[in-house]
Amino acid sequence: MDKRQIRVSKYLAKYLRHAPEELGLTLQPGGWVPVDDLLAAAGNHGFPISYDELIECVESNDKQRYAIDATGDLIRANQGHSVAVDLQLEEQAPPEVLYHGTVERFLTSILADGLHKGKRHHVHLSKDVETATKVGARRGRPVILKVAAGTMHRDGHTFYLSANRVWLTASVPPAYLSTD
Ligand code: HQG
């Protein structure tokens, strides 16, 4: 992603995940908003984005954060929301092990209390160490936690897989976490 695409992606993250009302937008079930409404609202709020730039940002996005629906009329963030929205995710059985990237300063609290979703809808988990390392590295030197997702699932915890392959669950109790 080039600099402009990163700016557009951050702008979309803000308004499609966290503050649609600030642009006068309302998320439809699934988190969708009309592409035309989004482009008009962005222009009216001093951040004009062309249709081509928007499509380019969706298609070249490093984490496939956004999706355009089959009609081409609607756009959404695939996950990461803090506003109330029903993403219409389907429950899925996770792989035996998933990973969570964080940083040293959160470890004591995480190992005592487990992983909490914070402001987001879910705890975000990755299927490989490489992805989890990138997630943790946003905050400093990454520390990777192993999550016994298969055992959690058999114990009755629910997992979802977002359209961009992020594993989501409500919380991870400490018993399912390890640092090795
Ligand atoms: C930590 C990005 C103390 C947790 C990424 C994390 C991801 C605790 C932070 C997605 C804790 C929450 C999500 C506890 C959790 N005590 N700290 N009990 N439980 N934490 O950003 O997983 O670029 O909400 O370790 O790539 O870092 O936005 O979650 O450090 O996929 O598309 O609290 O966001 O994607 O931070 O990242 P976040 P995350 P995007």
Image (cartoon, helix red, strand yellow):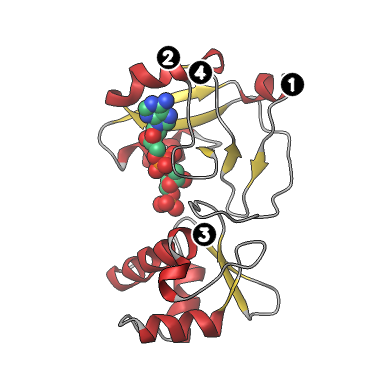
Tag 4 or tag 3, which sits nearer the N-term?
A: 3
Tag 4 or tag 1, which sits nearer the N-term?
A: 1
Mark 4 vs mark 2, CA separation in Å: 10 Å
Name the residue: 35% across, 21% down. 107
Q: Quadrant of ligand 1?
A: top left
| SS at badge 2 | helix
Any atom of ligand 1 within 8 Å of the CB at mark 2?
A: yes
Any atom of ligand 1 within 8 Å of the CB at mark 4?
A: no
User: Would you name the residue on which mark 1 appears?
Assistant: 154
- Tell me residue 64's x, y (percent): 51, 59
Q: Is residue 31 visible?
A: yes
Q: Residues within 10 Å of mark 3 (few under 14, many from 20)?
A: some
Q: Is 57 rendered above or below residue 169?
A: below
| SS at badge 4 | strand
- Tell me residue 29's x, y (percent): 67, 63
Amino acid under disc 2:
Ala
Tag 3 or tag 1, which sits nearer the N-term?
A: 3
Amino acid under disc 4:
Leu
